[in-house]
């Protein structure tokens, strides 16, 4: 079996989970093509949320998702989702 990029496997697994559980949603910060959640968004548009370039806000929305009976998958690069490296770089 040929090797598969981990992000491609993530995107495929997310589609499979989305088919089994309607509580699954995705949150993206303009990275759906990089995080491979773009296919989930095409198949389940009402369950895919692009929050723009607002990674910290996306984390807050994801933290509140369980209160609305949603299981979220957040897509952002590690550096952009963590406030500490950003402060350090300024």
Image (spheres, rainbow, N blue to C red):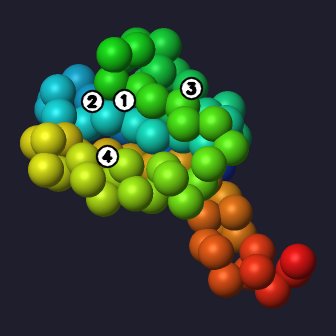
Label 3, secondary structure: give it: helix
Q: Which residue is mark 1?
A: 15
Residue receiving disc 3: 38
Q: Which residue is mark 2?
A: 18
Q: Nearer the viewer, residue 24 or 3?
A: 24
In the picture, the quarter occupied by the N terminus is: top right
In this rendering, does residue 61 appear at all? yes
Q: Which mark is residue 1?
A: none
Instruction: Give the foreground label among 4 and 2.
Output: 4
Query: Residue at (45%, 40%) from the top-left corner?
Result: 27
Question: Which residue is drawn at the image coordinates 48% and 50% (left, top)?
Answer: 58
Q: CA distance from mark 3 to mark 2?
A: 13 Å
What SS does tag 2 mark?
Answer: helix
Q: Which residue does the image show at 31% across and 46% down from the upper left? A: 72
Earlier in the chain: of badge 3 and badge 2, it is 2
**Residue 6 visible somewhere in the drawing:** no
Residue depicted at x 55% and y 60%: 56
> Few, some or many C-alpha atoms within 10 Å of disc 3 (few <14, some 14-19, many ≥20)?
some
């Amino acid at each position: 079996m040929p090797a598969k990029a981990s992000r491609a496997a993530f995107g495929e697994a997310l589609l499979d989970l989305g088919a089994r559980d309607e509580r699954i949603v995705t949150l993206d910060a303009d990275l759906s093509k990089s995080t491979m959640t773009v296919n989930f968004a095409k198949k389940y548009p009402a369950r895919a949320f692009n929050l723009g370039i607002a990674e910290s806000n996306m984390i807050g929305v994801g933290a509140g998702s369980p209160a609305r009976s949603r299981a979220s998958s957040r897509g952002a690069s590690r550096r952009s989702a963590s406030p500490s490296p950003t402060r350090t770089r300024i």
